Image: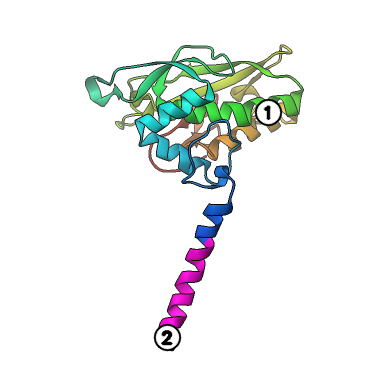
């Protein structure tokens, strides 16, 4: 009987503590809280974005409530295992992009969260100037991962490649030139990379391999990788 009580205490106390945490914690720290893209990221944000990846209605509602403008796309099956599902054309967020973007809703939700809470504040904090435009190599592209026969997340509209940032003061910060350049530019890029790791499933930069020497690859595919 004493052993049973000990097991109840051993198991029950941690479970009770977890339940109390979820009850009292701010929504951004609760993985089961409603998805609010305007809320600063917390311990539960990546899990909330992952939930949105699995629930079309939840995802598009989160974009609507954040004021993201987009054009929904019909699901499309394409040759070579490519396709667009639960996807959209991103029309307007808080910052212009250098090219039109087609991507999944989940990718757009993570991108907006990173843009709003990581990239834009970092630019003002470090340079004293907002971001005027984000330079990108694109999102949807029906292709394999470079040097392999594996389908890229780009082939599902589930990734974006970010090359640089034009600031309103005229400065241009790019991954290729400034990742290891020292100073404010390097600090800025390192902060953006770290912030992306907390939000996206996969974040790859120059330290991953030579193919990523000039951009950040950010995707909401499977797994969790930060390199």
Q: Tell me the number on the disc at residue 3.
A: 2
Q: Residue 98 at what x, y percent from top left?
A: 53, 12
Classify residue 194 by image quadrant.
top right
Q: Residue at x 48, y 76 (%)?
A: 9
Which residue was labeled with disc 1?
121
Q: Which class describes the residues within 10 Å of circle 1: few (<14), some (14-19), or many (20+)?
A: some
Q: Residue at x 53, y 26 (%)?
A: 112
Q: Residue at x 41, y 30 (%)?
A: 59
Q: Start and end of the magenta stretch?
A: 1-17
In the drawing, does residue 207 fall left or right of residue 89?
right
Q: Which class describes the residues within 10 Å of circle 2: few (<14), some (14-19), or many (20+)?
A: few
Structural distance between the alpha carbons of marks 1 and 2: 54 Å
Q: Residue at x 44, y 76 (%)?
A: 8
Is 45 colored magenta in this rendering?
A: no
Q: Nearer the viewer, residue 163 or 182?
A: 163
Q: Secondary structure at mark 1?
A: helix
Classify residue 55 by image quadrant.
top left
Examine the rendered structure and indicate whether residue 187 appears above or below residue 71. Answer: below
Main SS, magenta residues: helix
Q: Is residue 64 visible?
A: yes
Q: Is residue 225 visible?
A: no
């Amino acid at each position: 009987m004493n052993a049973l009580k000990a097991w109840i205490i051993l198991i029950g106390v941690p479970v009770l503590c977890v339940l109390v945490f979820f009850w009292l914690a701010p929504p951004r720290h609760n993985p089961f809280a409603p998805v609010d893209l305007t809320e600063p990221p917390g311990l539960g944000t990546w899990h909330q974005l992952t939930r949105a990846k699995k629930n079309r209605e939840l995802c598009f509602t989160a974009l609507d409530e954040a004021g993201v403008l987009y054009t929904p796309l019909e699901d499309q099956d394409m040759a070579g295992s490519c396709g667009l599902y639960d996807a959209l054309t991103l029309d307007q967020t808080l910052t212009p992009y250098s090219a039109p973007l087609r991507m999944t809703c989940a990718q757009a939700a993570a991108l907006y969260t990173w843009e709003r809470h990581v990239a834009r504040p970092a630019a003002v904090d470090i340079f004293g100037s907002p971001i005027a435009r984000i330079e990108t190599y694109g999102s949807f592209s029906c292709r394999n991962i470079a040097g392999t026969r594996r389908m890229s997340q780009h082939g599902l509209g589930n990734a974006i490649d970010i090359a640089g940032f034009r600031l309103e003061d005229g400065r241009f910060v790019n991954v290729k030139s400034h990742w290891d350049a020292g100073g404010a530019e390097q600090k800025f890029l390192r902060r953006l990379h770290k912030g992306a790791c907390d939000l996206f499933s996969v974040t790859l930069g120059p330290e991953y391999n030579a193919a990523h020497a000039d951009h950040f690859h950010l995707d909401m595919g499977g797994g969790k990788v930060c390199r």
